Image: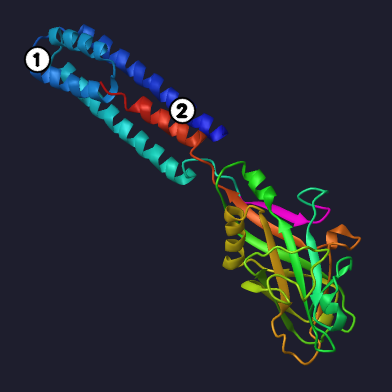
Amino acid sequence: MEAARGVVKVLFGLRRLQQTANRAIFRFCKKMKSRRSENNKQEILSKFLEVWVGDVGEQQVLFARLSRLGGRREVHFIYVESERMATMKRNILTTLAAMAMLTGAGTAAQGAVLSFQAGVSPEAGYTADAVTIRNDGTNASTNQNGSVQIIVGVNNTNSLLRGLFEFDLTAIETAAAGNPYTIDSVTLVLRQGDITNAAASSITYDLHLLGANSDFNETAVTWNDAPTVAGGSVGTLLSSTSYVPNSGTAFRTFGTTTAFESAVADILANDVSNSIRLIAKANNEAATTQTFSRFDSDEVTTAANRPQLNVTYTVVPEPGSAMLAISVGALLLRRRR
């Protein structure tokens, strides 16, 4: 906004200089005595007026006075001045056009980051969902909500465990305040808080969209009735991460990808809930050895260790203050008769 004010100030300053130049030429014309080269003088003055003067009445007055005044040197002076001012105007308009391109005809915001984490951000009252579903025995029909762990992978009985996550992204819409925006990066950070019996070799874990962003109830969902098939419908692959599970307690990150960014953008544009639902699983679920990782859930006491979705976005303002300044400048500099 300050830059826009500066542009306006400069443009109005140029306008005042223009008016001063007009008055100087007018006074000079009054001093002319010669009546020679009337057609040439009128042609030159017409060109000068086309460049700088917009009021028809002013033009007529100056035409009348020039028709009675002027000599060769004076006419040449007006010609030179009109050429100089025309060149100045072209340079100013070119500069303004370049400014418009460099600023994107606006004052686009720098990328902002919003973190979505239960009990932490975007506000202390924010809630998110995270729950394990597993296919071993009676656990397949038992809801696992309330556990402080989300377990993902294959356990020592070759049973499968998957994690479901849900984050409401409405805060991005609120922050954009009706302006269009781009999604620049998305990451999911999970804290591996317990490494008991964890694998000693590198394991890859995949993060997918849950079906077609299918909804689930954290307090009721089980392996058997997960959306939209048992075990949860595995949708678009969004991100993967690999590490050695027993290497120590650590934060594990599913990094940004084009697919992850596109999924968030599509949900915000087309899903009235503004919520993204995810499913995490081991890349190789046919493994015959345990490959699981235990992550802190949204129920863990330490809020900073809960699942965290980070979204970087950039608001793209509608043509605003800078474009207004440029438009004002163009109008000031393009006054026509």
- Percent x, y for residue 177? 62, 41
Q: Secondary structure at mark 1?
A: helix
Residue at left offset 44%, top offset 41%: 100
- Write down the residue under mark 2: 10
Q: Quadrant of the C terminus?
A: top left
User: What amino acid is at disc 2?
Assistant: Val
Name the image colouring: rainbow
Query: Closest to the observer: 177 or 71?
Result: 177
**Closest to the observer: 53 or 263?**
263
Viewer-closest of 211 and 76: 211
Residue 222 is left or right of residue 337, and the answer is right
- Give the alpha-carbon distance from disc 1 to disc 2, as whole Å: 37 Å
Where is residue 225, by image quadrant? bottom right
Residue 235 appears left or right of 126: left
Residue 327 location, x and y as percent? 41, 32
Answer above or below: position of 42 versus 231. Answer: above
Front residue of 176/184: it is 176
> What's the amino acid at mark 1?
Glu
In this rendering, the answer to whether 306 lies above or below 236 is above
Identify whether 141 is placed above or below 78: below
